[in-house]
Amino acid sequence: MATTTPARDVAAPERPARRAAPARRRSPGRRRSLLPYLLLAPAVVLELAVHVVPMLVGAWMSLRELTQFHIRDWSTAPFVGWENYRVVLDVDSAVGAQLLHSFGVTVGYTVASVGLSWVLGTTAAVLLQRPFRGRAVLRALFLTPYALPVYTAVITWSFLFQRDTGLVNHVLVDQLHLLDDRPFWLIGENSFVALLTVSVWRSWPFAFLCVMAGLQNIPGELYEAAAMDGAGFWRRLRSVTLPMLRPVNLVLVLVLFLWTFNDFNTPYVLFGGSAPEQANLLSLHIYRSSFKTWDFGAGSAMSVALLLFLLLVTAGYLLLTNRRRNDA
C-alpha cells in the first residue's frame, strides 16, 4: 500500500514593504548661503525706491524740456538732449552766471563750516578728555545741538537773529556795546555770517562726538612716554593726538563736506526759501530754479551736475588719502 507524503505548506517569503522616498530637503549649507541675501533684500529694495529710481528719473528729466506746460504729462515734454546742460553750464549766460555765483558761495560756506566745526569739535574733545567733576554734564550739553530737530533749531535761530527783538542784537548792542546800530542778519551781507553761525552750531557736536570716540582708542602709554621725554601739551597734541586721530579725521571731514555742501534745510528754514544773494547756496538755487520758475529740466541738469561734482571730489579725496596712507 502506497503511502502519500503530506504536502507541506510552503509560505511565500514576504517582501519588505517599499518605503516612501523621503522628501528632498535643502541642505543647511544652502539655507545659510541664501540667508544673507534674504536679509539684504529689504534694504536693497528700499535703496532702489528711495535713491536709485529717483536719480534715474532726474537724469531722464534733465534731457527733456520739462516746464509747467508739460508737468501734467511728462511723456509729452520734448527731448532736447544735452541742451539743458549747455545752458546751465554756460557762464556767459544769465543762468550759468547765477549758478557759478551760487557755486562760489557754497564752496566758501562749506570750507568755513567744515573747518570751524572740526576745530571746535576737536578742541572740546581734547579738553574734556581728562576726567573731572561735571565732565558728563558738559558732554551732554555739547551734544544738545546735534540732538535737536533741524527745523526746531533753525527756527529758533531765526528768532534770535531778528533785528529789533532778537537776542543777538540785544547782546551785541545793548549788553556788550560792540555795535552802534542794530544790523540786519537775515538780509544783505550779514546773511552769510548768520547762515554760517547756524551751520557751525549744528555741525560741531558731530565732530566733537567722532573725535571723542577716536580719543578713547589712543593708548595712554603713548602720552606717558611722551611726558617722560619732556613733551608738553602742544607737543603731545601735535605728535601723538593728531597722528592717531588721522583715520577718524579722514572720514569725519568727508562726511561733513558732503552734508554741508548739500545742505538745504538750514538755508530754506532760515530765509524762508528766498535766500539773499550772499547766502544763496547751490541746493537752494536748484530748488528755486525748479519750483519757482517751473523749469524742471534745467533744475534736473543742475542736480545731475552737482552729483557728478560730488562724486569726483569724493573719489579724488579717497584716492589722495589712500595714496598718502600707502606712502606712510
Image (cartoon, grey):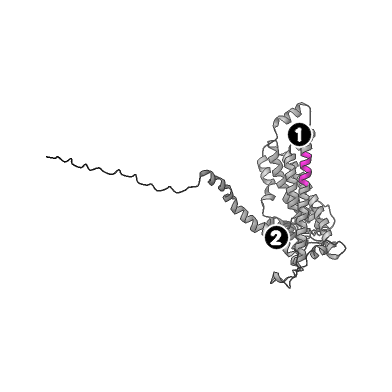
Q: Is mark 2 on a helix, strand or loop?
A: helix
Q: In this picture, which residue range is highlighted in magenta?
A: 317-325
Q: What residue type is labelled 2?
A: Leu
Task: Measure how far apart labels 1 and 2 are at the Cα level.
Answer: 46 Å
Q: Which amino acid does label 1 sit on?
A: Val
With respect to residue 277, does 29 lie above or below? above
Residue 76, percent across and down? Answer: 71, 72
Q: In which quarter of the image is the C terminus?
A: top right
- The residue depicted at 79 percent of the width and 31 percent of the height is 232
- The residue depicted at 51 percent of the width and 44 percent of the height is 28
With respect to residue 53, does 18 lie above or below? above
Dot label at residue 272: none
Q: Residues within 10 Å of mark 2 (few under 14, many from 20)?
A: few
Q: Mark 2 points at which residue?
A: 56
Which residue lies most toward the front here? 1
**Is residue 303 or residue 189 the one in the foreground?**
303
In the visual, does 314 lie left or right of 21?
A: right
**Is residue 62 or residue 198 the one in the foreground?**
62
Q: Taking the image as drawn, is residue 222 in sight?
A: yes
Q: Name the residue under label 1.
A: 240
Q: Is residue 54 magenta?
A: no
Q: Is residue 321 magenta?
A: yes
Which residue lies most toward the top here? 228
Residue 130, percent across and down? Answer: 70, 35
Q: Which of marks 1 and 2 is nearer the N terminus?
A: 2
Q: Quadrant of residue 207?
A: top right
Magenta stretch: dominant secondary structure: helix
Residue 281, percent across and down? Answer: 79, 58
With respect to residue 89, does 212 lie above or below? above
